[in-house]
Amino acid sequence: MKLAPGTEILIYPTAQDVADAAAVQLVQLGDNKQERQLKARVALAGGSTPKAMYKALRECTGQDAAALRRIRYFFGDERAVPNDHVDSNVRLAMEGFLAQLGVPAEQIYPPNGGAHLLSAEAMRLTMLLERTLPKAADGTPQFDMIILGMGPDGHTASLFPGTEALASDVKGYVSNEVPQLNTNRLTLTYPVLNAAKHLLLAVTGDNKATVIRDIFSRGDAPKVYPVEHLKATSITWMLDMSAAMLLPEELLRKIKPAG
Ligand code: 6PG
């Protein structure tokens, strides 16, 4: 059982420990860029897992809060709702920690899920990335870090099984029709996800355990889940015990308990 080069798995006792550890990674990223007076570019995850991370972030003070205010915040995906809607990933982050920490509005790049034409909004966002991010060797806009979750069906961002966005070569965002949710979503595409300097997957809960087991027991068998097509050079999986509980023994022996 071998992990792909650049992939690490960290297992924590609880979902809160995962949230706290993910928050530390974000603060460290903001700190690291401080020396060079640059601002890190980060895309935030959606869904419910980030809630606990945002709680940890909004409690930051002093240097940690200053580090978080030195980051430019983007979003991995957004639902087809206005930014003030209860389901909005933008609202989740704004209310979760961005407002509390006083992150300047000019450092926040919210997708407009309430746009009349999501495909036009996806194009606007793609051009925004083109203008504001450095480029990877192949010209793809490159994030310093993209924080992602994973659904019980192995989706990540809004790259759901069987949906068109999985095959998109757009180097930015697309509007993705998700029949299983009877909705459209704005989502980053694989080219951008895989060009990121670092992907942080925060996956918690026993409803993710089967997919986690499948992913890390796959060997050379064909990949099944959208999340398996992530191949950035540096990927950290932060799992709680519930999500990790079905991992093969031989792999668990190699993973040092974190947290
Ligand atoms: C979204 C997310 C999505 C999420 C997973 C996991 O907008 O819902 O981007 O990809 O990360 O569905 O969701 P939970 O964290 O709620 O399990």
Image: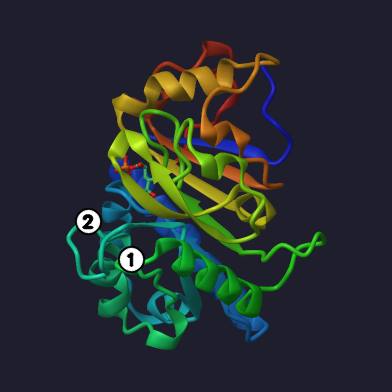
Q: Residue 154 in the image: state x and y as whole percent.
A: 45, 31
Q: Quick one: label 2 or label 1, which is nearer the N terminus?
A: 1
Task: Name above or below for residue 15 compared with residue 250.
Answer: below
Mark pair 2, 1: CA separation: 20 Å
Q: Residue 99 in the image: state x and y as whole percent.
A: 27, 79
**Mark 1 = which residue?**
57
Task: Name above or below for residue 125 compared with residue 167.
Answer: below
Q: Residue 230 in the image: state x and y as whole percent.
A: 61, 40
Task: For mark 1, give the secondary structure.
Answer: helix
At a point 42% along the width and 38% down the height, the residue shown is: 150
What amino acid does circle 1 point to? Answer: Leu
Q: Is mark 2 within 8 Å of ligand 1?
A: no
Q: How many marks?
A: 2
Task: For mark 2, give the secondary structure.
Answer: loop
**Residue at the farthest left position:** 86
Q: Where does ligand 1 appear, by image quarter?
A: top left
**Mark 2 = which residue?**
87
What amino acid does circle 2 point to? Answer: Asp
